[in-house]
Amino acid sequence: MEPLDQALAARLCKLYDKVKGDRSVFDAHCNEISEVMWPAHSAAVIGMSLTTGDKRTSKQFDARAESALKKYMAIMESLLTPAGGKWHYLKPSNRDLLKDRETRVWFDGVNTILLSHRNAPKANFQGVQQQKYLSIGAFGNGVKFIDTPDKSRGLRYKAIGLHELYFLEDHAGIIDTALRCFKLTARQAAQKFGMENLPADIREAVEKDAEKEFEFIHVVMPREDMDPNRMDAKGKPYASYTMAYQKKQMVSEGGFNSFPYCIGREPRAPGEVYGRSPAMTALPSVKVLNEEKKTMLKQGHRAVDPVILAADDGVLDTFNLKPGAVNYGAMSSDGKRLVDILPTGRLDVGMDLMDMERQDIDRAFSVDLFQILMDSPVMTATQALEIAREKGMLLVPSFGKYQADMLGPQLDRELDLLSEQGLLPPMPPMLREARGEYDIVFDSPVNRMQKAEEGSGLMRTVEMTLSVVNVTQDPSPLDHFDWDTIVPEIADQQAVPQRWMRDPKVVEQIRASRQQAQQTEQAINAAPAAASVLKAAPELMNQGG
């Protein structure tokens, strides 16, 4: 075993200090967001220690922003990666290979295997993905680590808080380096890295204070000295280094065949590496809403328990505020009140102002795009398709970025891990000759919304055609529609399961049976007329003779 490079450990720890310092202003911005929108993460964003179970909502007066953030997470999950749903499939890059049945069967099998391992309970994909969407909505960046389980085969996902991770881009703007700071107890460090690789202070803590925590830095970066002929870590494209931070000592070295961190980012400002979140857009409205809520609470208190005004003649010395009480001397003999209430502000105006800010917050998190479905639960098929089309036009541009930058690399990493573990079937000969190159086709609900434009256009055309048919009483305009092609494709756009659709051969059998039944019915209906003709035939012949 080669000795660990301690000089490299010092350089990497210095790099970590630099990237952490460079992000200090961004972290402060994120901390301000967490305090009013995601209090559970407040202070952790800037690296402060948190007390488990403590109350962190002291700066949150209105919960609308946190509610909108959670709705944003639900929107992202339901449209991009719906739980238990098939939101992608794989196909060969060479379209000619689609003609090869073995290749088609292989890709179907790989899709099934991938979904099975991803949705396995031990993988925890859905829970981690929800955390990632929340982080993207709040801080503009979400991270998860994809690896294999420690004692079994398959996939394992772990959500990484943005406060732990820093990343760097390559010359093309692609993230290729990640630096993560995390804590382990001395006992955990000995289990993970081995006593012989730990600094003296951690080894001593294992004996005297095993639960004492220490900081470690994990760095994943392209390996500059990669040797493709080697089978160990030196032969892998990405190097993995772990250092004990306080002592700047390397404790572990490894490698990855693919980048293990899957990072999603919102759009970035020029010259920036980290994305800017919907929460950053909504932050001014959130701060204004909090101040308005404070004012409304004060005014509401005054309206319910008003300030009393009285003449300076000692009337209030014995003033009774209990319900039903009688206070003598609070009114003059001519009926003029000597005690009055201080007028309060306009609560209705305050409510209107708060609603304006809440609407801005909902718009920032795209919640308003889906409100129409709740406001109009009953609609025609044409209206539903039209709404889906409009939403697709607004959402596909931004959601397509997530598929390209976040979900595409995730699929590459998943397939790489499954292949390393021998969990994928052998490639068929034709696909092996094509080097196994594949394309990812996303088939999530948001992609179907984009396709809904075709369905919406069809429904409008059919409605206009039916109007023509009703006016002319001529059904021939409907002959232009190829329903045998239209119906299956519309069903596919609307995510109708294939098992609900009849096989084309069964459809042909049903049509043949229907046609035969119609012919039989026509023959039966024609039988009395034919019998009358046969009966009258001799008489007609005699008359003719």
Image: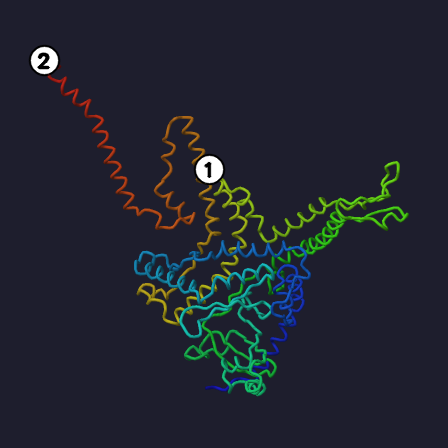
Q: Position of residue 177 (x, y in %)?
A: 54, 71
The residue nearer to you, when weighing 289 against 15, is 289
The quadrant where residue 236 appears: bottom left
The quadrant where residue 269 appears: bottom right
Which quadrant would the C terminus be assigned to in this image? top left
From this view, report whether residue 510 is shown above or below residue 99.
above
The residue nearer to you, when weighing 469 against 249, is 249
Question: The disc labelled 1 sits on which kind of residue?
Answer: Arg
Residue with the most extreme right position:
313
Name the residue rendered at 54%, 62% in the picture. Answer: 131
Name the residue rendered at 90%, 47% in the picture. Answer: 313
From this view, report whether residue 160 is shown above or below residue 545.
below
From this view, report whether residue 399 is shown above or below residue 10.
above
Density class for disc 2 (Cα within 10 Å; few <14, some 14-19, many ≥20) is few
Density class for disc 1 (Cα within 10 Å; few <14, some 14-19, many ≥20) is few
Question: The disc labelled 2 sits on which kind of residue?
Answer: Asn
Q: Position of residue 384 (x, y in %)?
A: 48, 42
Secondary structure type for disc 2: helix
Name the residue rendered at 44%, 34% in the picture. Answer: 463
From this view, report whether residue 242 is shown above or below residue 110.
below
Secondary structure type for disc 1: helix
Q: Which mark is residue 70?
A: none
Q: Position of residue 151 (x, y in %)?
A: 42, 75
Give the residue pinned by disc 1. 460
Question: Which badge, 2 or 1, comes first in the chain's sequence?
Answer: 1
Give the residue pinned by disc 2. 542
Q: Position of residue 116 (x, y in %)?
A: 39, 63
Which quadrant would the N terminus be assigned to in this image? bottom left
